[in-house]
Image (spheres, rainbow, N blue to C red):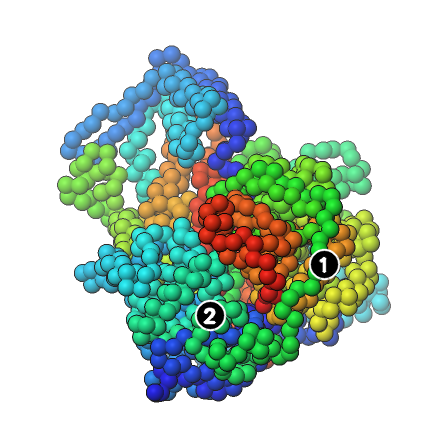
Amino acid sequence: MPPVLELREISKAFPGVLANDHVNVDLQEGEIHCLLGENGAGKTTLMNILYGLYKPDSGEIIVRGEKADIHGPNDAIARGIGMVHQHFMLVPVMTVTENVMLGVEEKRNGVFLDRAKVAKRIREISQLYGLEVDPDAYIKDLPVGTQQRVEIIKVLYRQADILILDEPTAVLTPQEVEGLFKVLRSLVEKGKSLIFITHKLKEVMNLADRITVLRNGRTVGTVIPGDVNPEKLASMMVGRDVNLVVQKKVAKPTDTALEVKELFVEDERNQMAVNGVSFEVKIGEVLGIAGVQGNGQTELVYALTGLLPVTQGKISILGEPLKRTTPRHILERGVAHIPEDRQRHGLILSFPIHDNLVLCTYYKPPFARGINLQQKKIISNAETLIDQFDVRTPSIYIPVSSLSGGNQQKVIVAREFSRPIKLLIASQPTRGLDVGSIEYIHSRIIEKRDEGTAVLLVSSELDEILALSDRIAVMYRGQIIDIVPAAQASKEYIGLLMAGIHPDEAAKAAPVSSGEEVERVF
Amino acid sequence: MSANKEPEKTKARPSLAKMLGGSAFQSLLVPILAVFTGLVIGGIVIAVTDKGVAAAFGNFSADPGGVFKAAWSAVATAYGALFYGSLGSPREIIEGIRIYQSTGDNAAFLKAIYPFTESLVTATPYIFAGLAVAIGFRCGLFNIGAEGQFFIGALGAAYVGYSIEGLPWFIHLPLAILGGGVAGAIWGAIPGYLKAKFGAHEVVNTIMMNWIAFRLSDWLLTGPMMSSGFRPVTPNIQKAAELPRFFSEPLRFNWGFVLALVMAYLVYWFLFKTTLGFEIRSVGANPDGSKYAGMSVVRNFVLVMVLSGGLAGLAGAAQVLGVDHWVGQGFSAGYGFDAIALALLGKSHPLGVVLAAIVFGILRSGATRMQSMAGIPIDIISIIQGLVVIFVAAPIIIRWLFRIPGETSDQTVLTRGWGK
Amino acid sequence: MAEKTYIHGTSPRQRMTVGAILIVFGVLMLLLFTPGTEAGQTAKFGMNLTSSAAIKIPDIILPVQTSLYVLSFIVVFLGAFQMARGIRSPGALFGIVAFAFVAAFLIWATKGKSLSLIGMLTSSLVRATPIALAALCGVISERAAVVNIGIEGIMLISAQASVVAATLSGSMALGLFVGVLAGALVAAFHAFLVIRFKVDQIVSGVAINIFATGATSFLSSKYLQHQGSLLNNSGTFPIIQIPLLSKIPVLGPIFFENNLVVYLMMLIVIVMHIVLFYTPWGLRTRAVGEHPKAADTLGINVFFVRYVNVIVGGMIAGLGGVYFTLGSVGRFDEVMTAGKGFIGLAAMIFGNWNPIGAFTSSLIFGFADSLQVKMQILSVPIPSSILAMAPYIVTMIVLTGVVGRAIPPAADGVAYEKQ
């Protein structure tokens, strides 16, 4: 049988990067085809080409045996191609119905929106595929898992039979992932064909009919899950053998570095996002905070670093309660912060690298004398640090915006680690990075721990939490519902907690401890 | 493929070294061509609105060349008057020097350089006001209120200048200058505080402050600050408060210009060589990142609006203490709005602002003569300025017009919606 | 961006502070307005316009001192209540206090005289018209995420273009058409700069304002001033009384006895509300303003939506320009818009980017404007220039968000980058 979709010899270059280099992928009818590759391998670029968001430099797209010219989403939609984007394409202040009908509105009297008719269709689709959602709910009030269902409904509403899902599991709990896989399998049973993009090996082994591996914009090969093991796939992805386990010694916690008592924090829209959280982090240990994105982790970190005001509660650093929660006051107490949004918070993108490396210390000797900046010291500091932290750049004078994501993150790490610190708060420290950078940053964090720093790690990647933490706290709806030693924690148990299941219930449903060695993340 | 892997285009680092260094030509090219294109379009406006051209156009079928001749003559007359009125005539200047050397009489020389000194006199408040807007841009703030701050600064300086008697000049003059600066600073601080405290957008608020300044001055000039007489003007300032002039009447060229240059250097040093300037530029480039790094975004907003208002106030002070010696209604005459064009043209760099201010000083001062000689309303300059702002903000238009290859993303981005 | 502020007085300390301020304010009101009043003095507020009104309703005659005491007491009481219990809705609190203050001020100003309240409300609507049109231009553009700060300039150009066209042709309709067309053209230019070339939207708007001020003043001093009767003398739209509706007491003379521009403005408010919230175009517009990428991935042409909305906005602002000349004085004067375009933007923000909200907040500004004019007529012992600051000060207060903060469309002011 001819494939429903074929991508032939697709190439696409961005300034300085060859994102796709003669890539070939084909999709059979009724299969789930996984596109596997690490961050930056060119998966999303390829799919954006297929969906008409990018124009390929060369190559052709063949849909159901016919060569297709896809110049924009409209062409893709017309050919039955639908895409669920990694970052949801939903308008938060609109309802589910409005989001679904956008662009293909039903009309009453030829003029007015017919919301009722669309809502009815949405209910039908929900039933057919088991995608439960309230058509009248506002997107901003829905949890991410439900938002993803809306995205899938959007695609099905447009009667797509080729579905592209870009990293759909990144924001889900392990149980939600299972639920999603069930939906995807039912879609395939009803005749849809799926391209599933991911960088997570395990998912691929579970879900895929076939796997195509991309590396540095090239197709490495297409395999069937039964023929390969995870180690083989990993080396195909990265291009070398990778050690799947993070090397770390048993933690030797000493004094308490951070103590949080009954903390309440409101988010930017004045909603209570952190609801009475208490915990402590000791010097020499990594406390990981697990949880589905949007359960108050961001606001917790913002409050700890002074970016959001504390509504109520107490924060103590090294035994001393914080009196003022301004960022500078906190920084000067020996706290380092790797922010979750590195371009928004961590860097001044238009500033040169050397200025970014003194962003938190520019006002103190040796970088300033009185109000005079000491340019020579700032330069020599930058030269030392880019060497020491392996930042790959042609010069320290270029704007930091021209670096790759991994190198930008290294600039932040270099800056934060070069100060004398007692507490490191790392939020999503490896999001969107390639494997090399991930390995580097992980080893630096563990190194810091062993040097006598307390580490608070926040990540929505459960594997990352499991790999690095000594203890794991799970956050759900602004509360920490349990803290467990990492050595014993089983992924299933943590996953249930992340979904808001009470610890007692969760312990009945899954073993608290798994006892097995934890796999490294990508 | 994550978006941050695609290398973003390098934004030019706005340093003095770069402006003077290898790419000085590139940096200056767009502003120069922007002014040039503005003048060309201004010329078209002059030609189109000219009576002679209209007459020749009525005769188009008989003498098609006549239209172009008439147009050329209209534009040449107008711009001839403009440049003669702003730069003077080289021949007269050389002649003046010769007479001075042979007879020791400098009258002819002074008469010859009068137009150019007048341009520098006009450029003086422009430098201050341009710096005011530029320092705001550096912090991501758009101060459209330089106009009101200028006016209020002038009133402040005038009040200190006329109300106190019997002080020696070395006390009275600095005091009067300070009066102008402080008055402007207060006028700038209000929208700055409202922005910092409530996130109220400074663009609308500074404009409101302009109108309030105009109304306030209406009241002051017809009431508390009115001189004895019937005209709504302040009394003349004391001799001791005047900025000394370099030459005798009618040349008004004075120490204000030197003061402006010194201030430009100070602003440069402040912005690029101090920790405070580092903070201001950082907040302007990325307020969230600056907050993360421990800077107070709010404090910087207020600080910059105070400095910006203060500089605009100094512009008013320089005008009243150095040139007019009193303040009347309509005193500000668009200086504050011209300052926006200046700051953009000078790429918010003090040196660029000084150069742009001198160019605008030449245009503005020549336009007065153009109005009297060629009957072109002085508002033509505002038309040219509006165009220059557009061209500087959209260099892509200039690059396209003149087929210059180069970065297409070389955009000026200053503001982000409504103070989010 | 601004550091976190508790504008709604959530903390107990802030509750006490706000309450205390209110009590002081109430007492100040009493101290400010009662001196000089005499017992038994009254203030008369006319409720009928002499011309129309089939049904006359009685004028309101208030005893000055008693009214002032009552109003001050209301404010003090609110303050005490706020201190003791806290008031949920800061908007309502602010509204009542503002009303009490304005009422006290009016009673004080009218003491021993009479003031036509209906006349003042009518002139509020008329004076609100250009502000509302500017605000509506802002709403339609910014709902598609394009900030247009050049409204002031557009109105100037349209004002001049329409009066010249009407005078030359002798046709008011042509004048209206030319004014609206001019608005569309200038807005199209703005749209082109910010959409095609991604010029900073504020800079482009400011450039339009500088250019418009220069160009209209240039043409004015070159032509209009010398040949005023030939070029700058159009006459104004007549007042049209709507049958029946204009006979309704109070509302009739205010809303249904106006000229064409005022009616068009009210019509646009209604139509824009329906289009934005009940039609596909409105849905797309809002999506483009909130999340252009989402709209793009669904095949909506983001640029097209933005062009259309900005140009339609320009036509509305053009109508606002027509108001100044054909709708008001029948003549163009330099810089006659006097900041109304910017006040309109404040009205848009205060109205939460909704057509109806923008209209009602424009009425507040119109009221402030008409108040200062009436006060001059009543020869209140406050200099007229100080009173003339009122609309500008009200604008600044509104922008602080003390009365409840508005949330702009998420993508407002951001150029859309199509990959």
Identified at 47% across, 49% down, the residue is A508
Identified at 19% across, 44% down, the residue is C241
Q: Circle 2 sits on which residue?
A: A206
For residue A240, what is the image quadrant? Answer: bottom right
B235 or A92, nearer to the observer: A92
Residue type for callout 2: Asn
For residue A60, what is the image quadrant? Answer: bottom left
Identified at 40% across, 26% down, the residue is C100
Of pointers 1 and 2, the one earlier in the residue sequence: 2
Secondary element at tag 2: helix
Rendered position, C367 above or below C71? below
A503 or B402, nearer to the observer: A503
Identify the subunit bearing mark 2. A
Residue type for callout 1: Lys
Rendered position, C206 above or below A63? above
Give the alpha-carbon distance from disc 1 to disc 2, as whole Å: 32 Å
- Residue B329 in view (yes/no): no
Q: Is residue C218 left or right of residue C232?
A: right
List the single residue furthest toward the top: C39
Q: Circle 1 sits on which residue?
A: A249
| Tally of numbered tags | 2
Q: Is residue B111 left or right of residue A130?
A: right
Q: Which mark is residue C125?
A: none
Residue C192, image x, y percentages = 44, 68
**Image quarter of the N terminus of chain B:** bottom right
